[in-house]
Amino acid sequence: MTDDWSEVVTEVIIDHYYDPWCESTTEEKREWHVFALFLMKVFTATAKGARDHVGWLLQRPFPSVSQWMGEEGDKFRAIWIRYRTKQNLIGPFLRQNTPIGRSMPL
């Protein structure tokens, strides 16, 4: 496995008939659109980034915002955040932002 992502080959699958909302009610669609606006306002996501994130969530077992923000989503985020934090976030952050001789509690 390489750490150089430029060597990784990816293939994009485009399906013009895919409808992420096919099983969503009108109310669920509205909630997801409001959630996308929340991502744009609070996390300064772009419109495309927020839309892509909602699309990603709709492919997971979270048909509604309340499930994503509820207990099921908490469990899913805990696993993902724990992995991402250990692998990618804490180490580089501490190496770049911690003065020598000073430790930061995790």
Image (cartoon, rainbow, N blue to C red):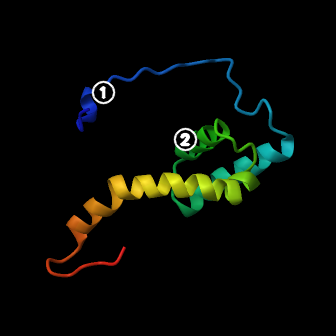
In x, y percent, where is residue 39?
59, 56
Vertical placement of residue 20 versus 67, above or below = above
Closer to us: 9 or 101: 101
* Residue 8's disc number: 1
Label 2 amino acid? Lys
Q: Earlier in the sequence, mark 1 or mark 2?
A: 1
Name the quadrant of the N terminus. top left
Name the quadrant of the C terminus. bottom left
In x, y percent, where is residue 11?
43, 20
Residue at screen point 22% across, 74% down: 98
Number of marks present in the image shown: 2
When asked about the image quadrant of residue 2, the answer is top left
Vertical placement of residue 90 versus 57, above or below = below
Vertical placement of residue 104 versus 24, above or below = below
In x, y percent, where is residue 32?
72, 48
- Residue that label 2 marks: 48
Instruction: Tell me if mark 1 has few (under 14), some (14-19) or many (20+) residues whose alpha carbon lies within 10 angstroms of its own.
Output: few
Which residue in the rendered view is the most extreme toward the bottom?
A: 102
